[in-house]
Amino acid sequence: MATNKEIVIGIDVGGTNTKFGLVDSQGNILDEGRIKTTDYATVELFVDALYENITPLLKNHTDKTVKGIGMGAPNGNFYTGCIDHAPNLRWGEEVPLAKLMTDKFDLTCILTNDANAAAAGEMQYGIAKGMQHFIEITLGTGVGSGIVVDGKLLYGCNGIAGELGHTIIRPGGRKHWSTGSRGSVEAYCSATGIVITAKEQLKKKAYPDSKLRQVKVDDITAKVINELAVQGDKLAQKVYQITGRILGEALANFVMFSSPQAIVLFGGVIKAGDYLLKPAKKYMELNLLPAFRGRVKLLLSDLKEADAAILGASSLVQKSKATRAVHPV
């Protein structure tokens, strides 16, 4: 059992930035920092930079025992501790990050993909606390997911289960910019996909007075679309109606797969609120079998977006029995 004297190093590896923090057993972030992931040509240089930046933080808490390191990363494999074929990282196809971190810090390191880390944090500290069955969907630049069944994250036979964002919802549809697949959930429901939808709608003649038409094409972002939707712009609102419908249809598939208590949505895209959620809920319910209708909650994460990734990564270690209580200082 974790004590108030134990802390965990939580690390969120992003394609652009990497955030890290020292987290106590109550989910308080005692110290934190960040480095630019893209500044390091090799993973070894990246690990060295983490050590150099985290060590001073640990020296501020010498009264604490470090239980281990939890990391969330794109394509992180829980079983192997490797980052497998991450398209937005340039360090190679199979990167043994957990081993490199363990060797450098002399601490147990647990790695998983970033969406699984978010689900783990939600289960320990967030709105899904106490739930045994739920799905976390992260809606950001991409679409990630973490599936919890019987209180445990679903990893599958090879450690990479739960890529719901890459499931096909529109067969033969929009080509994904990275994978080349056609019609995936991520191609439509991510922030990137929302921008593409907006640009497609702008080519049509409807809503000639939309303020979205006054924005330079290269300046259109999901944030801009959201702001205009809130202001009452009908074209911006239609973009979310289209996105919400596709998301809702996908959620119905996910519900019938694992029969969760709830689906928890997390990430920058959910700032659109009801413009996205109302159509998503409507089309989720419409596409469910009667036995599932009205039984699954659609919830928004209540974790702070800035802290959730660090908390999620740290929770991997908080729940683990393994520990090497050694300060790397």
Image: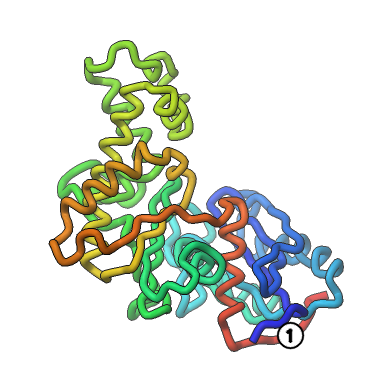
Q: Is residue 25 left or right of residue 134?
A: right
As displayed, is residue 96 above or below residue 175? below
Residue furthest to the left: 290
Q: Circle 1 is placed at which residue position?
A: 325
Q: Quadrant of the C terminus?
A: bottom right
Q: Is residue 303 left or right of residue 244?
A: right
As displayed, is residue 149 above or below residue 261? below
Please report the residue visible at 58 percent of the width from the left and 53 percent of the height from the top: 304
Residue 239 in the image, given as x and y percentages of width and height: 31, 32
Residue 314 in the image, given as x and y percentages of width and height: 61, 70
Q: Quadrant of the N terminus?
A: bottom right
Q: Nearer the viewer, residue 298 or 204?
A: 298
Q: Is residue 157 left or right of residue 61?
A: left
As displayed, is residue 131 above or below residue 238? below
Residue 105 visible in image: yes
Please report the residue visible at 50 percent of the width from the left and 65 percent of the height from the top: 122
Residue 234 in the image, given as x and y percentages of width and height: 32, 22
